[in-house]
Amino acid sequence: MAAFNELVFSGVQPTGNLHLGNYLGAIKRFVEMQERNAQCLYCVVDLHAITLWQDPQALRGQIREVTAAFLAAGIDPKRSIVFNQSQVPQHAELAWIFNCVARLGWLNRMTQFKDKAGKDRENASIGLYDYPVLMAADILAYRATHVPVGEDQKQHLELTRDIAQKFNNDFGSSIQAHGHGEQFFPITEPLIGGPAARVMSLRDGTKKMSKSDPSEYSRIALTDDADAIAQKVRKAKTDPEALPSEVEGLKGRPEADNLVGIFAALRGITREDVLKDFGGAQFSSFKPALVDLAVETLAPINAEMKRLVADPAHIDAVLADGAARAEAIAAPTLDAVKDIVGFVRRGPALRAV
Ligand code: AQP
């Protein structure tokens, strides 16, 4: 059995409208992993973004904006590796090999494709269908052991594990012959959890907060100023009851549950702790406290994002440096995969067989 060093990988799509769900469910947790001194790679997944049409000029800006959000939230590009996916060719290359490992039946079960393709499935891009295979390649090009993501990515992470397992089984004897022990790829652990694993729309507590929701009032954007945040929280849908004093009392109250969850995640506490302070309170007093907390947290991120986006040359230099460091990890993985699969490649095989 091979031993794998702890390595964290995660990505965010540069598809515009970065929101509080992306921050609390993903980016904030990326920083926490970095602070635990794990080796972390954080990727702006631009190859994923073009599975749906992106205007080229806007896409370039969005790639820099997500990078700025990473840095503004506290990701240190010296300690963590920050890069955009298209600069590291091994992602696409490994995805092709995984296309030949993954089964059609596995992809047919992916609910995100069904949601995003909608009724006009025949007209969806092949990339959108293949999205989870590329995601497996993103993660396994680094043989990442842990992936912090929101709950919506759970099914894709399960597919990554299935692909790793099948590759390890299908090529078992070749993996051993090349000196990699019994497993070449780790069975990656998803890190999903906390009060903000699934932040819901401010307009409908049963729908995920999402970039593509046509209503601006459904989400708090990372680019929103204090006034916009206050207005959106004030208008957020609620019910007429006071907040309960126990978490069980949030059952069947999706909007109340969502706002309490957001408060908890922003403060870094549990829903229970929030209800200790606000149990029995009306939304008329809870919402202003939530506005204060959201503004206090997001205003410095917002200001730093603006400063960084105004200096695209700096952002591009961060991405270039990150891409070179990422490729230094991914290239040997791909060389080993090619040897295991039986390709002939330039340079010496890792172990002649
Ligand atoms: N509502 C959410 N709550 C918690 N986490 C979330 N994430 C997304 N929405 C929520 C997490 O953010 C990370 C980056 O997401 P992404 O940009 O790669 O993809 P996405 O899931 O497509 O984002 P959206 O906002 O939901 O876009 P659309 O509208 O296109 O569906 C991931 O870790 C994700 O789990």
Image: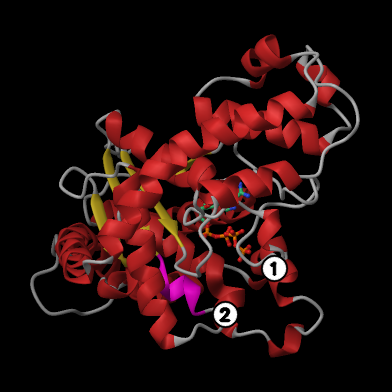
Q: Residue at x 52, y 50 (%)?
A: 22
Viewed as shown, does residue 43 lie left or right of 226? left
Which label belongs to residue 105? 1
Residue 347, quarter of the rendered image: bottom left
Looking at the figure, which quarter contains the C terminus? bottom left
Residue type, numbered disc 1: Gly
- In the image, the segment drawn in magenta is 45-50
Q: Secondary structure at mark 2?
A: loop
Q: From this viewpoint, is residue 350 visible?
A: yes
Q: Is residue 313 above or below residue 344?
A: above
Where residue 126 sits in the image (x, y, percent)?
59, 83
Which label belongs to residue 296? none
Q: From this viewpoint, is residue 146 visible?
A: no
Q: Is residue 160 above or below residue 28?
A: below
Question: Mark 2 and 1 residues: CB-CB less than 8 Å, in contact?
Answer: no
Q: Secondary structure at mark 1?
A: helix
Viewed as shown, does residue 305 lie left or right of 258? left
Which label belongs to residue 52? 2
Residue type, numbered disc 2: Leu
Query: Is the CB–ligand 1 distance for label 2 below 8 Å?
Result: yes
Viewed as shown, does residue 72 lie left or right of 275? left
In the displayed orientation, state which residue is furthest to the bottom. 123
Q: Residue at x 62, y 75 (%)?
A: 129
Main secondary structure along the magenta-highlighted residues: helix
Looking at the figure, which quarter contains the N terminus? top left
Residue 338, quarter of the rendered image: bottom left
Disc 1 crowd rating (10 Å Cα; few below 14, some 14-19, many 20+) is: few
Where residue 149 sits in the image (x, y, percent)?
51, 46
In the displayed orientation, state which residue is furthest to the left. 347
Where residue 258 sits in the image (x, y, percent)?
72, 36
Residue 311 vs residue 209, the one in the foreground: 311
